[in-house]
Amino acid sequence: MANNNEPLTFESAIALSQSLLLQVDSGKLSEAEIGSQIAELVKTENGARGFFVTFLTSNSSLADNPTDAVIQALRSSPEEVAELLVKNLAMSTAQELFHHRRQAEEMVHGSQQVQMRTANLIKLVDLDEVKERSQQLIDSATTGEGKYKAFLERWNYDAEQKQLICAALQQVTLP
């Protein structure tokens, strides 16, 4: 992993995640090694961001069928992981509509893949923090206020996108 004296950058987290997935796909890592490397990555915001952007968009079979080691590693940093899972589901849901409106079907497929993988991870990690943040994002999307107001404004989501975000979050977090 990263040098302990220097903070992990987003870019280096992407590179580490790409290397990790290549090693996984070539059978070079044990489940324990996979879990410990992912747990190390998701301990920090940059590490978690780099991991998820790589993992959710990769061609790795691990992204479609995460092992227990992956799930346990993600559970080891519930705050960072919850925040990013909720935002990734929201963004991929909104982007799917954005690309559909522009008839960019290949991009629609990419957004759907990230959405499906993220929803699956949300269900598998089963973190209370994900449920809390999902509700906070739903509240911000419906009221225009709250914790995720700035996030929604930054991406300039329209009413239809916000409605789809709420539905996607409710679908994966309601019992």
Image (spheres, grey):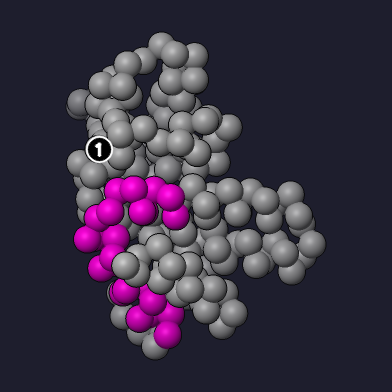
Quarter occupied by residue 76 = top left
- Which percent across, then down, holds residue 112? 60, 54
**Which residue is pictured at 56% across the width and 83% down the height?**
159
- Which percent across, then down, holds residue 74? 28, 42
Instruction: State whether residue 82 appears in this view.
Output: yes
| Secondary-structure class at tag 1 | helix
Quarter occupied by residue 94 = bottom right
* Numbered marks: total: 1
Give above or below for 164 relative to 57.
Answer: below
Q: Is residue 174 left or right of residue 116?
A: left
Q: Is residue 123 left or right of residue 115?
A: left
> Front-most of 117 and 155?
117
**Which residue is pictured at 29% across the width and 31% down the height?**
69
Start-end of magenta stretch? 119-142
Q: Residues within 10 Å of mark 1 (few under 14, many from 20)?
A: some
- Which percent across, then down, holds residue 128? 22, 61
Magenta stretch mostly in which secondary structure?
Answer: helix
- Which percent across, then down, holds residue 44? 26, 42
**Amino acid type at mark 1:** Gln
Furthest toward the top, the residue is: 28
Q: Is residue 113 left or right of residue 151?
A: right
**Which residue is pictured at 49% across the width and 47% down the height?**
117
Furthest toward the front, the residue is: 175
**Which residue is pictured at 36% across the width and 32% down the height?**
67
Give above or below for 92 relative to 4.
Answer: below
**Quarter of the image where the C terminus is located:** bottom left
**Quarter of the image where the N terminus is located:** top left
Q: Which residue is mark 1?
A: 72
Q: Is residue 42 magenta?
A: no
Furthest toward the bottom, the residue is: 143
Instruction: State whether residue 15 appears in this view.
Output: no
